[in-house]
């Protein structure tokens, strides 16, 4: 079969690879229907996050179960499923508590020895713990597919940011970052009943989506000017809940500075740049909470899915380009030069 | 009257100062019955935290109201009261929400232009917002005085650490730091129903108090060895709730490292050393929450006081020496060289 392989910085190729097969009795093989490219894939693409030449890539996909191992009872061939961006055994302490990202048997799609999501098929370890059923009739629904696909990562991650930032009905929320996760954070905050949502972003095509997702205000400034703008919008106090969806020092510094005293920063941007953006003295004096991390998408998909299926939320709007597998290298380039927000791969 | 004045590093004196008087209609004057020396006072004593020569010092006291301004209605002359370690107006958004430490009219005892707690009397701004009534009959009760005095800071701060770390009935808790705040954190966690409390400390007189306060385990190691010891005590997982009561880089690093995935670090140690102890990548991968800061003691005193009066908790055990005002310079020396844990000043 064919799959996306990373050979080095800026060197993404579609290669012929061995067909996946059941290797352990808890495995399933899933034929991919839709996958996508993540902003975090770009760290590998740019060489910032190191990869072994020949590693597979892609961690967001949905598809049809093709084959299952002897221990699998939760899904069967023909089922339509979505995978969260990490697999997990579904039975350990952490899985039962809803923190599947800490499962000791868990792993990340594309890590050495595993399949990536950007390929024709994927071997799924711990299929019962990992996969979530989708309605079969939705498998061909071009209107629903993008939203269901977004559950595998960006929408679940935005929801994690909103929960971590303690968004409640009526909250004043600020979202740092206008990438797909930031936009989904806006949508998640809106879904949780936020009273006011200030989106920080400077790309109008993106902030337009933020407004469709529920943003009430947009701040195009950065750094100190952004802090001043958010303070001005909030009577000088800042936002009760801040979603940090970038992961750089500057974005963390901004997020902490625009939080209202006693408020929380929900951080889901993969950290790049260390801890220097965290001013612990400022946090201490103002009782700022820092919560979040890698999102346990597996815990959130069952909660978010009904709202996607009903049309109550449509996180699929973050996809602004759809390509076939052969278009993946171009898709990386487009996301890297920001001519695409998020690229969907239809097989 | 006489009060403690800091003239420079290692230069604490008892000086004659002007008697306090009502300067604003919301003021009260309180005649101090008990005050104490705080571990955080030592930062000023050592010259690490800068002070203007001649500044007053001390932020923990209880006493008898002597005089009130025309706007004061909540206390009257003769009342027995305790002051939290910051004053606050009692009417702003933050005060009403229970985050009095962020009151825009608030301030810290001993800051330039204000009285310190380690003196014969104190002018209390915003007396209605600041002071909490104590039972008059307790004013002469040598058994209750230390516990009530501890509410002004260390017990309330320990409680803040425990709440921030999300201690719940049955929680596995670890407490970094065996100073008075760390010990009160043990007591607060015990009061909240923690199932297991691991106290990290190497001074037996202190860890003995930790055990009296509810610690089930003591770890005398530091750094990596402490992390290993806590992991071993917790089945390899770490503690669900970690209380950080030191404020150094090393203590923060230890606190984050011994937190269980998905757990929270409640930090109340005044930060000295910046943010380098915060490993954001480790926090991200393991979904560690960092919460806490300067404790809104004013919000907690009414909740904790009944348990002190009933004897359900006795945070006063952290005081291991009682002196008169003339003994204060010696008290600083004793706490600085760790021959005293916490010094109480009886007037």
Image (cartoon, coloured by chain):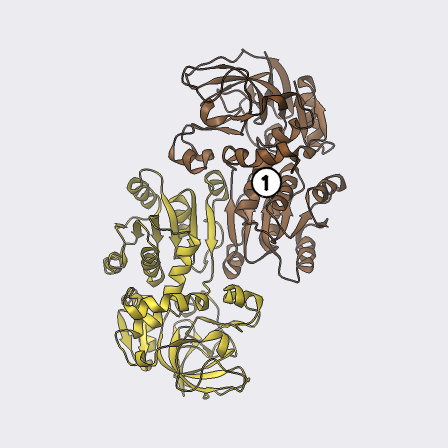
Chain colours: A brown, B yellow
Residue B59 percent across, percent down from the top left: 42, 73
Q: Quadrant of the C terminus of chain B?
A: bottom left
Picture quadrant where residue B331 is located: bottom left
Name the chain letter of the residue that bears numbered label 1: A
B72 sits left or right of A187 in the view: left
Q: Residue at x 40, y 18 (%)?
A: A71
Relative vertical location of residue A55 with respect to residue B69 in this rendering, above or below: above
Q: Residue at x 42, y 16 (%)?
A: A24
Characterize the local packing of mark 1: few (<14), some (14-19) or many (20 or more) Cα atoms within 10 angstroms. Answer: many
Picture quadrant where residue A321 is located: top right
Of all residues shown, which one is farthest toward the right? A204
Residue B54 percent across, percent down from the top left: 47, 79
Q: Secondary structure at mark 1?
A: helix
Residue B148 visible in the shown view = yes
B173 sits left or right of A281 in the view: left
The residue lying toward the viewer, choosing from B285 and A218, is: A218
Relative vertical location of residue A70 with respect to residue B218 in this rendering, above or below: above
Q: Quadrant of the N terminus of chain B?
A: bottom left
Residue underneath mark 1:
A158
B48 sits left or right of A58 in the view: left
Residue B134 percent across, percent down from the top left: 37, 76
What count of labels does the image hold?
Answer: 1
The residue lying toward the viewer, choosing from A244 and B8, is: A244
Picture quadrant where residue A329 is located: top right
Residue A263 percent across, percent down from the top left: 55, 55
Residue A34 visible in the shown view = no
The residue lying toward the viewer, choosing from B156 and B7, is: B156
């Amino acid at each position: 079969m064919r799959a996306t392989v990373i050979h080095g910085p800026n060197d993404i190729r579609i290669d012929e690879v061995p067909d996946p097969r059941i290797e352990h009795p808890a495995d399933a093989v899933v034929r991919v229907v839709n996958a996508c490219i993540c902003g975090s894939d770009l760290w590998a693409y740019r060489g910032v996050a190191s990869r072994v030449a020949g590693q597979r890539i892609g961690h967001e996909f949905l598809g049809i179960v093709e084959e299952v191992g002897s221990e699998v009872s939760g899904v069967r061939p023909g089922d339509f499923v979505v995978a969260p961006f990490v697999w997990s055994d579904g039975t350990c302490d952490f899985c039962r508590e809803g923190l599947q990202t800490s499962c000791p048997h868990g792993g990340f799609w594309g890590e050495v020895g595993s399949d990536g999501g950007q390929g024709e098929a994927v071997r799924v370890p711990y299929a019962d713990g990992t996969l979530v059923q989708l309605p079969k009739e939705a498998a061909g629904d071009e209107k629903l597919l993008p939203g269901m696909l977004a559950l595998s990562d960006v929408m679940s991650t935005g929801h994690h940011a909103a929960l971590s930032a303690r968004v409640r009905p009526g909250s004043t929320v600020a979202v740092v970052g206008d990438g797909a996760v930031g936009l989904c954070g806006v949508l998640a905050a809106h879904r949780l009943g936020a009273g006011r949502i200030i989106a920080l972003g400077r790309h109008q095509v993106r902030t337009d989506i933020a407004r469709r997702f529920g943003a009430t205000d947009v701040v195009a400034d950065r750094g100190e000017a952004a802090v001043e703008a958010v303070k001005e919008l909030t009577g000088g106090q800042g936002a009760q809940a801040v979603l940090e969806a970038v992961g750089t020092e500057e974005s963390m510094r901004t997020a902490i500075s625009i939080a209202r005293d006693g408020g929380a920063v929900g951080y889901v941007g993969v950290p790049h740049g260390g801890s220097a953006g965290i001013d612990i003295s400022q946090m201490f004096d103002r009782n700022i909470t820092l919560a979040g991390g890698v999102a346990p998408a597996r815990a959130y998909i069952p909660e978010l899915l009904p709202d996607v299926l009903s049309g109550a939320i449509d996180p699929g709007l973050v996809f602004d380009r759809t390509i076939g597998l052969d278009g993946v290298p171009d898709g990386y380039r487009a996301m890297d030069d920001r001519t695409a927000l998020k690229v969907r791969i239809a097989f």
